[in-house]
Amino acid sequence: MSLVEALLAGERLALARLLSQVENDTPAGRAGLDALYAHTGRAHLVGITGSPGTGKSSLVNQLALALRRPPEGTPPLRVAIVAVDPSSPFSGGALLGDRVRMRDLSGDPGVFIRSMASRGALGGLARATAAAVQVLDAAGFDMILIETVGAGQSEVDIARLAHTTLVVEAPGLGDDIQAIKAGILEIADILVVNKADLPGADNTERALRMMLELANPGRDPHEHQGWRVPVLRTVAAQAQGIPEVIAAVQQHAQHLRSSGEWHSRDRARLTHELEDRLRSTLAEEFHRRLPAADYEAAVEALLQRQLSPSQAVEKLLRQADPARSPQSGSSNG
């Protein structure tokens, strides 16, 4: 039985092995993704982002516990967690500590936790995060919680990947104004003030509501593409406010489906992934065609200020494809 067949049959070991292949971008991983793609598109992808210290991991832990232990009469959901940890800029390694913080979930066959090193990728996600999410989607998980690195304001890539994005804030971090400058509030479908038992929670909630008003002049400050962005309070360490967050996540999923926005977000996500893969594939093909000496000569021409970067690109393209017509205003150098 192949890894793909074993994964579709529900074998967790096959799932873990295929995720490793995908994360390392091996031929087997790429083949597995191709084979599994037809089985994707069913999971609800939920992103959790915010600055370090807001308690994202604790919140994710409590959300998963509540989804696995719902009120009587409600079936539990199968939940996967992808937790992206920052890599060391020196060794490339990562602590991958989210599994340590999520010990309450260990032993539950309906939960799968995967920690991933960011490997230097910007935007809060690892380069293989989207591919890992596809594997977990094909494995039949109902909801996939994607926790970003926690670098704060640059973490907007999650909005391209997730259907629903939670932005987590906490009192006393002093980054409220920077958050709106970076536009991180613009990606929020749900705002969560975690650690709401700490002093300053009222001020943090008030600041978030004020920033929503500043970001949406002339209309309901909480409304975003027909969805009214809620500002919720939680104390994840004590499991307070978790049912309200889950209710908001499920209501947002219903809104996306009823409004057609679910399809639109899937289309935007897949378009972005296609363009990203196309760029990387074309770059690899370009370097295969172009002699290394020509590339080094272009770099040297840049250093000597003999060519501008745009002129160097045009020259390299013509060297790789002699039939290419020169662009207007370009120079042969």
Image (cartoon, rainbow, N blue to C red):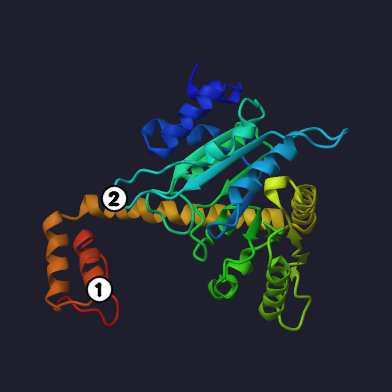
Counting labels gives 2
Residue that label 2 marks: 90
Q: Is residue 145 above or below residue 174?
A: above
Residue 234 makes an appearance in the image: yes
Q: Position of residue 287 (x, y in %)?
A: 24, 53
State the residue at coordinates (64%, 42%).
61
In the structure shown, which secondary structural element does the residue marked by tag 1 occupy?
Answer: helix
Q: Is residue 54 left or right of residue 28?
A: right
Q: Amino acid at mark 1?
A: Pro
The residue identified by callout 1 is: 309
Residue 284 vs residue 17: left or right?
Answer: left
**Residue in the image at 54% along x and 20% along y:** 6
Label 2: few (<14), some (14–19) or many (≥20) C-alpha neighbours in 10 Å? few
Name which quarter of the figure residue 187 lies in: bottom right
User: Where does the image place residue 235, in percent across and percent down from the top left?
Assistant: 71, 52
Give the x, y percent position of residue 67.
74, 39
Q: In which quarter of the view is residue 323 placed?
A: bottom left
Check whether the beta carbons of the residues at disc 1 and disc 2 lie within 8 A of each other.
Answer: no
Front residue of this view, candidates 243 and 258: 243
Q: From the top left corner, tell me how far across and down residue 167 is, in percent.
A: 63, 60
Q: Is residue 327 left or right of residue 207?
A: left
For the C terminus, give its image quadrant: bottom left
Which is in the foreground here, disc 1 or disc 2?
2
> How would you rate the neighbour count of disc 1 (Cα within 10 Å): few for under 14, some for 14-19, many for 20 or more?
some
Q: Could one spot residue 43 in this view of the protein?
A: no
